Amino acid sequence: LGRAAWFKLLRRSRRLSATAVPRAMCRWEVKRTFVHAFDSDDETETDGCDFPCHRVRASSDSLTLLQPSSRASFTAEQDTASTLSSTQPIDTDRPASSVCYGARVHNASELSEARGQAPVGVAQLGADIVALAFDEEGCKAVGRALELAGPAEARRIAEHLHGCAMRAAHSMHAQLVLQQVIRHVGTEDAAFVAEELAPQARAAAQSSGGSDVIARLLEFCPEDRRTIALTDRVLAEDVPGLLCHKFGHHVAVSVLSNGLRRQAAHIVGALLCDLQRFARHRFASRVLEAALRYASEEERALLACGLMEQAGAVASLACHTFGVHIVRAMIEVPGEGERTAHYLAKAQRRVRKDRYGFELLQELGLEQPAGVDGA
């Protein structure tokens, strides 16, 4: 029987036991933003239906089958959460920014008191730290250890990762540990990461984890000579290709916001080569937006003027899914924002017909058009 036929049968026979629902019905059903998980032990009725179900917030709009093993795991997690909530009283006065590390640390003040004390078992990890760093659950344990450890203990943990930084940067789990190392140890103790990534700097910058690791180096130790050398190697060749890369553009944005001025100027120079193309590119447009916000005033004005050189460019960008963000950044450029708004007002009749352009006009509070098309 089909799904609709089963529901009809369940409505007609109120005495039908919930256990008679076939296993195929034990699944996740996505409806709007909620997931309905059928369960014979829950007597709650939802949305006017006669079948028992309970609700869980969904993060996807797709329909995902829940296998028996997954359903058992889901139930076990609910039982565990229920047990914890029943045995541990809820502190209603706890601040919203509170964090929980096991049962010992609950808020920022307790976390500060816990710093300098390594979690139980960290001292016994030894050489297993490398294996844990590459494990899905182990990387969380090492990251938590770095958060709670004192400077000396954090350095000892970081020493175990010497020699495997490049391999860790390409790992979806170990790269998180490298980021925690950069956050919680000093510049000198984290320098090994930049040194080991430097020989293959471009490959690291164009990988998912490596781009995040380099961005973290630029955030926490941008003036360290090893970080500077690593960034120079990344920018040594094909900068436009880096700007358009799925992961490489993250590094370019970090250079603009945290890197040296000469390195940022190198990226601005690459953007000036083809502004209109980069302004409409999915990834390069984010770099151009960052340049319009973080570059020097002269470079920001130069980029804005270059974007407005072509007739009708502002209106065209305002009607583009990526270009509209560029126009928002152009409005914030000192001395060029008024000019950008003027072009938008002139082309208001055209811009308001587009979804993205109409939203932009609403944000700017521009009046209804009475003027001429074109910008």
Image (tube, rainbow, N blue to C red):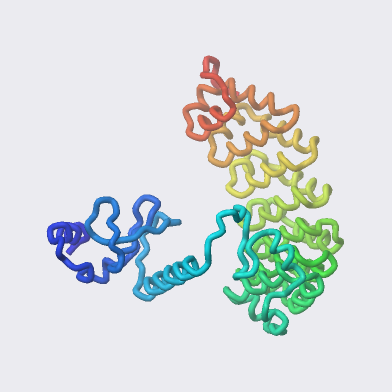
Residue 318 seen in the current view: yes
Q: Give me the residue at 18% from left, 61% from top.
A: 6
Towards the viewer: 158 or 361: 158
- Can you tell which quarter of the image residue 311 is in? top right
Farthest-out residue, right = 225
Q: Which image quadrant for residue 236?
A: bottom right
> Residue 35 at x, y = what percent?
37, 58
Q: Residue at x 67, y 74 (%)?
A: 142
In percent of width and height, residue 74 lies at 41, 69
Q: Quadrant of the C terminus?
A: top right
Q: Nearer the viewer, residue 274 or 137?
A: 137
Q: Is residue 230 above or below residue 123?
A: above
Please give left or right for residue 361 compared with residue 24 in the image. right
Question: What is the residue that sits farthest to the left in this orientation?
Answer: 12
Image x and y of residue 5, in percent: 17, 59
* In the displayed structure image, the side of residue 347 where residue 74 appears, left or right: left
Residue 195 visible in the snapshot: no
Residue at 62% over, 61% down: 99
| Relative to 63, residue 84 above or below | below
278 lies left or right of 370: right
Look at the picture and state if 284 lies above or below 187.
above
Residue 1, how many percent across, how many down?
Answer: 17, 64
